[in-house]
Image (cartoon, rainbow, N blue to C red):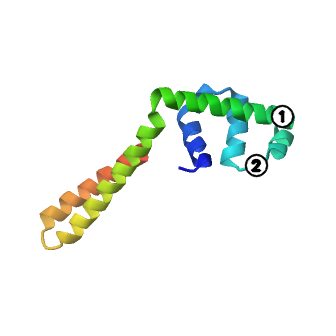
Amino acid sequence: MAKDLQFIMLLDCYGEFLTERQQQVTELYYGEDLSLGEISEISGITRQAVRDSIKRSEEILLDMEEKLRFAERLQKLRENFSEIEKAAEKAAEEAQKNPEVQEKCRRIEACVQESLKLL
């Protein structure tokens, strides 16, 4: 997983453990892809303070993930649901002649889609 994407996911999972300023700065840096200088202007703090805030936020987010592994499990769940969805689609294609099987496949796909929304 790319570093930026990793921190966006960690921010989604553990962002509440950061201060409001840390959340804002980290979101601008990783989510909006702004430079330290741009964030400094927006936030009204020095570039060094922005950098320090981002580094501290990264430490907190990585520490939380190391302890809880929630983001890792969430990613694995998404991958599993994707595999289930592909299998259900393939089964539905193969079951063209059997409406009962088609309906079961549609229900599986609907459940997968609903579960993905919850993630």
- Give residue 8's quadrant in the image: top right
Of the numbered discs 1 and 2, the one sitting upstream in the chain is 2
* Residue 11 in picture, x, y percent from top left: 59, 37
Q: Quadrant of the C terminus?
A: top left
How many angstroms separate mark 1 from mark 2 (CA)? 15 Å
Residue at 57%, 32% (x, y): give it: 62
Outermost residue to the bottom: 97
Please name the residue that numbered disc 2 is placed on. Answer: 34
Q: Position of residue 113 (x, y in %)?
A: 36, 53
In this view, the residue in front, 22 or 119, is 22
Question: In percent of the image, x 19 and y 57: which residue is there?
Answer: 104
Instruction: State the residue position of label 1.
Output: 48
Q: Which mark is residue 18?
A: none
Q: Secondary structure at mark 2?
A: loop
Mark 1: amino acid: Gln
Relative to 83, say whether 4 is above or below. Answer: above
Q: Amino acid at mark 2?
A: Leu
How many residues crowd mark 1 within 10 Å: few (<14), some (14–19), many (20+)? Answer: few
User: Residue at left 38%, top 51%?
Assistant: 79
Q: Residue at x 22, y 59 (%)?
A: 105
- Residue 47 in the figure: left or right of residue 103: right
65 relative position to 77: left or right: right
